[in-house]
Image: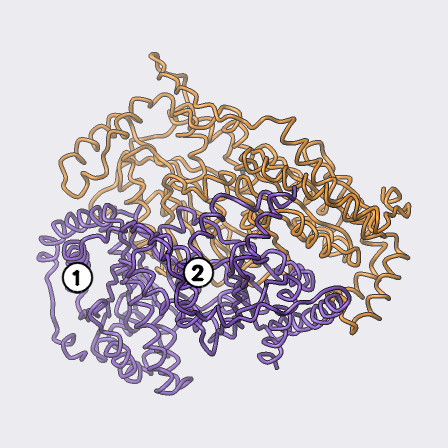
Chain colours: A orange, B purple
Amino acid sequence: MFEVAELGLKLTKKEFEEKAPDLHTRLLQVQRELLESGKAAIIIVSGVEGVGKGEVVNRFNEWLDSRGIKTTAFWDETDEQAMRPRYWRFWRAMPAKGNIGIMFGSWYTRPIIDRAFGNIDEAEYERQLQEIVQLERMLTDDGVILIKLWFHLAREKVQKQLKEDAKKKHKGKLKRSPYTAEFEKQFEKFKKVSQTAIRNTDVGNSPWHIIESSDVFYRDLTAGQILHDSLSHALVSVPVKKKKTKVAKKAPAEPVAKTILDAVDVSGKLEGDAYRNQLKKWQGKLQELTWQARNEKRSVVLVFEGWDAAGKGSTIRRLTQAIDARLYQVISIAAPTDEEAAHHYLWRFWRHIPLAGYISIYDRSWYGRVLVERVEGFAPDEDWQRAYNEINLFEQQLTESGTIVIKFWLHLSPEEQLARFREREKTPWKMHKITEEDWRNRDKWNDYKLAINDMVARTSTEFAPWHLVNSNDKKFGRVEVLKTVCKALKKALG
Amino acid sequence: MFEVAELGLKLTKKEFEEKAPDLHTRLLQVQRELLESGKAAIIIVSGVEGVGKGEVVNRFNEWLDSRGIKTTAFWDETDEQAMRPRYWRFWRAMPAKGNIGIMFGSWYTRPIIDRAFGNIDEAEYERQLQEIVQLERMLTDDGVILIKLWFHLAREKVQKQLKEDAKKKHKGKLKRSPYTAEFEKQFEKFKKVSQTAIRNTDVGNSPWHIIESSDVFYRDLTAGQILHDSLSHALVSVPVKKKKTKVAKKAPAEPVAKTILDAVDVSGKLEGDAYRNQLKKWQGKLQELTWQARNEKRSVVLVFEGWDAAGKGSTIRRLTQAIDARLYQVISIAAPTDEEAAHHYLWRFWRHIPLAGYISIYDRSWYGRVLVERVEGFAPDEDWQRAYNEINLFEQQLTESGTIVIKFWLHLSPEEQLARFREREKTPWKMHKITEEDWRNRDKWNDYKLAINDMVARTSTEFAPWHLVNSNDKKFGRVEVLKTVCKALKKALG
């Protein structure tokens, strides 16, 4: 496929200087339209060493208004990055709405290098490429304009270029990064592996553009032109999606069909010494296991969802009592900040993903998308419907990096909830926990039941299963959660 | 000073259980008041190993509403943290307005350990403590409520406690972190060093509270009580500072007194081959030097301020043309996001501090505080006036970690600015750069001149000097900047 980029296409300096000012103006224009559209754009700059990717990045920065651009170079991973799932650093670099993110190096780099050096086999390589396809679809579904540029040079041209660079090295010309020699040797290998990458990820919503780079004028003008056309095409053809604030459905008057929650046995109870002994036993085990996880550098993500007043907070405290305070973080999910709202909804959860060996406990989570946002109509149908798949992909990326993901739904009966609401209204240090919203949510019990049923059905995977816990008796529920976490850790750890 | 915390103060379980519910309620109350006040609170939890700091942190999390708290444990630095100035990770953990940040371990930990192990001498230790005093003053000046708790145990009690813990280890009790044995041996040494820390940093705006910790009930109730009293005292006694939106001063009709800008020679010019040769020469040197900086793991912070239309953008591009795109980031400073606005104004600049070996180029910077915010009256007088000192401290912290800080003011004459404004209005790809605001700023030329004069006078330090550059001739200015950066790097690098 690279033959199309080995034709020797050229522009004279004069031609370039005639055309560049107009392109410059039009790029600034389309950048302003992007800002107004509220869409984000990602430009992926790829290609072997020696084709001048850095020069192109500089050219883009020259042509565009720097106030809306962020260039991120994905160099070697730092220790801290390596201690997180591989997509973490890319999520950190995602541009906010209206902005352009230039990615110099990207999620393609590591799979290509791993395959070229034989660290992974072809099957694993193609699996990783499929993961990329899914990630990119997630982004474009969210309105991101994804522009993927591949800069190519025929082999003999690369060699020539590298030799020239080597000669010029001490004459004040730009030097290549230190990887040059190795990359040159591996050129053919990389070419083949790169072709596979392009072929497997060249999909309608995010096509590849292969750009011949033997002539800098042709290269830069073509890249700029593609950038302009891709942006203006995306801005014209796809009108900005209006977030419909759908009116929330009324709770059905009839009881809903049987859901998975009806199968939860809420009769179990635990009290007195039996409770205290169990609590002590499992807290002890948990304490040992969390140190073991730390030593084995496995991180843990615990997700707590549940009915209002089911006891998420007090259950989490029984866990944290047993964990060294340096090892865990409790993340309480509230309304997103404006930075968070300007990104894909998963972005704010990626922010808090723990380092290897540490524990993040989410008090409410990304499942808000398919619970409250669905039931209240905050997210349009198509958004929450594709969220199941996005969430599965997200959790798969976590578990692939060695993170242990455990998810809880704390269940209670409507009668028990009512009793707890009444109790809260009477207790001074609990009063703040009961609001109008809790009563409104309660009225939508059946809508939530359906949403919970769908959530569990679609996102209970073998790598990140749901646990429906009987919290009708708080003490029973706490011990159940502790026990489940311990068993999951024990199974996952060496 | 620790004698006061070796009295054997105790509470029975019954006493604790009688008093705790009331304290719990009052803490929740004062936490809500904090949220409404728009102030942030930081709780520093300190003390030797074995006093139960982790248990106290858990207790606070139990008593307070978890939605407004963030606990951060400062464990060993990760590689990535170690590659940034030492205060970076603390800035990342600063609570937003209305929230509480619990710091388990803090900026005290490393100086105390370094001194106890003899890595630093007494003079350096006291200097670091002074730096802490200044940091804490910066925070309290910004309205942060700083509550510093020191948990103490007599030596024999620590030993007893540690022995008991060791016995209980496998009976499901909480285990101490692995440092125990070492800390025990060093107990007296740490005690002495800690006393110095407390004595040197026990100042009016952020006093220490020493809490006897031989009895868990006494310890927790006392800590909770201090937390409550400190918060409610701070919320009552210091009314929330209203940000006065001062009306900006009119530009004085008379020309202002001679300022430092009048001394800038704006006659230098450079064009044609002379310019191209100089540009090429210094870009070549810069490229070598930035690689050298990368290899020596020295980071570089370049600050660009200047009159509108002085050519900040084009000057920065002449720099970045010469730097490998993987080594630098250009940070364009625009209005703060809401997350940024909810923190100390320096917080958003700390976010972008480069890793060791990398370069951050700020297109406008923290100096906005003493320029636009002063002139336009966005910041009250007392805020921008203390900013000089805060900025010096900030830049000192950067340079102490090995960062090379170079600051430029790009200067031009009012006549040249006018000519450029007119030119911009006529050129398609420059039109977007000229706005009403530029004309308004121009009317305030004299106010800005005074502000610039003060800024240079107060923040041009030996570790981070200002360079006033003649940009009346753009080409001259660009070469001047390149040359200055090269010389500064050459001087700083090995």
* Quarter of the view holding residue A78: bottom right
- Label 2 Cα neighbours within 10 Å, binned few <14 / some 14-19 / many ≥20: some
Amino acid, disc 2: Trp
Q: For mark 2, give the secondary structure.
A: helix
Amino acid, disc 1: Ile
What is the number of the mark on residue B366? Answer: 2
What is the number of the mark on residue B226? Answer: 1
Residue at x 17%, y 67% (from the top left corner):
B215
Residue A173, image x and y in percent? 77, 67
Q: Quick check: marks 2 and 1 in contact, CB under 8 Å?
A: no
Give the CA distance from mark 2 to mark 1.
36 Å
Q: For mark 1, give the secondary structure.
A: helix
- Above or below residue A353? Residue A31 is above
| Residue extending furthest toward the top | A254
- Earlier along the polypeptide chain: callout 2 or callout 1? 1
- Above or below residue B249? Residue A381 is above
Looking at this view, is B113 or B456 the one in front?
B456
Report the quarter where the N terminus of chain A lies. Answer: top right
Looking at this view, is A328 or A280 the one in front?
A328
What is the total number of numbered labels drawn onto the structure image?
Answer: 2
Chain containing the residue with disc 1: B
Looking at this view, is A282 or A336 the one in front?
A336
